[in-house]
Image (cartoon, grey):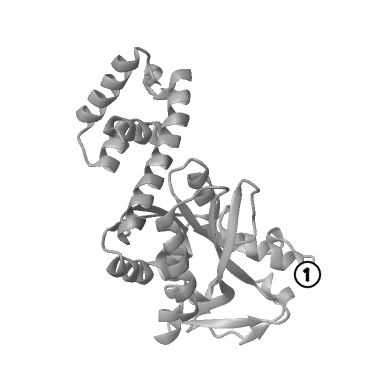
Amino acid sequence: MDFRLNVFLSVAHNLNFSRAANELHISQPAISRHIKELEETYKIQFFDRSKGKIRLTPAGEILLKRAEEIAEKYKCLQEDLNSLTGTLSGELRIGASTTIAQYLLPPLIAQFISIYPDVHLSLLSGNTEQIEQMLEDLKIDIGLIEGYHRKPIFRYTGFQQDELVLVTNMGNKCKDEISIEELSLLPLLLRETGSGTLEVIEKALAMHNKKISDMNILMQLGNTESIKLFLENNSSVYAIISIAAIAKELKNKSLKIIDIKGLEMSREFAFVINQGSQNMIRKRFVEFLHRKAKYI
């Protein structure tokens, strides 16, 4: 594919020349030059650079749609040719919600790359809401998310179960089991709005006619690592997080789990892709994770 179209796509998705330069590993003047050449070729502007911001012009919106179609066709062509030689090469852009990106994917990606060394994987992380937006904006090829929220524009496939648990500092002299009523009195650390973790907690509480607003929320934090550090340095607070995120802390006995009678907080980690899209590398990656998930 014409490299200038790659440059255009990067600028159009980022709406920032500097970020596009970093993404493509070329200089910002080179980005500007490629865009200028495209605009001179078609004798029309694709970006409005007035008022200190970059926006797509109507012509830019048309080119964006067609360039994305060309990029997808080019990927299909590469995959078809690779299938004749039995090789797998190309790029797969992965987006994963925070828990999956931090605690599940790194060793699996390492294994996948060792099997398919000609595949270039990139990983972006964010909360579930942000990952779905990246997928909708075509900034990633596949998302791995947590929670129950589903949009009809995507296709979802579950691949592993996860459990959320109430945890606290090992030094906290508290009971090993509490009721849901007692839970509402505890100073809680929770994930931010838009996270799959918070969505699961909300749904579990709703089964008992409770709301997040009924809880004694001390603070909401943007990632699980921040919550764990807070817990390890304060013996009087609690948090509800994925059990997958605290394997090390349970082993070294810096954190402990408190059971909540009658409250089940489970969820399914799921792949999410755009409806109707095809991608051989993504298909192979999904198959690989399905095989490995039971060993995680």
Q: Quadrant of the N terminus?
A: top left
Q: Secondary structure at mark 1?
A: loop
Horizontal and vertical percent position of residue 79: 37, 51
Of residues 225 and 15, the one drawn nearer to the viewer in this rendering: 15
- Residue appearing at x 68%, y 76% in the figure: 264
Q: Circle 1 sits on which residue?
A: 208
Of residues 132 and 43, the one drawn nearer to the viewer in this rendering: 43
Of residues 34 and 265, the one drawn nearer to the viewer in this rendering: 34
284 on left or right of 174: left
Q: Is residue 201 visible?
A: yes
Q: Quadrant of residue 167?
A: bottom right
- Residue appearing at x 46%, y 42% in the figure: 138
Number of callouts: 1
Q: Quadrant of residue 288?
A: bottom left
Horizontal and vertical percent position of residue 134: 48, 45
95 on left or right of 187: left
- Residue appearing at x 57%, y 52% in the figure: 194
- Residue appearing at x 40%, y 31% in the figure: 12
Q: Is residue 290 above or below residue 51?
A: below
Horizontal and vertical percent position of residue 140: 43, 48
Q: Residue furthest top?
A: 43
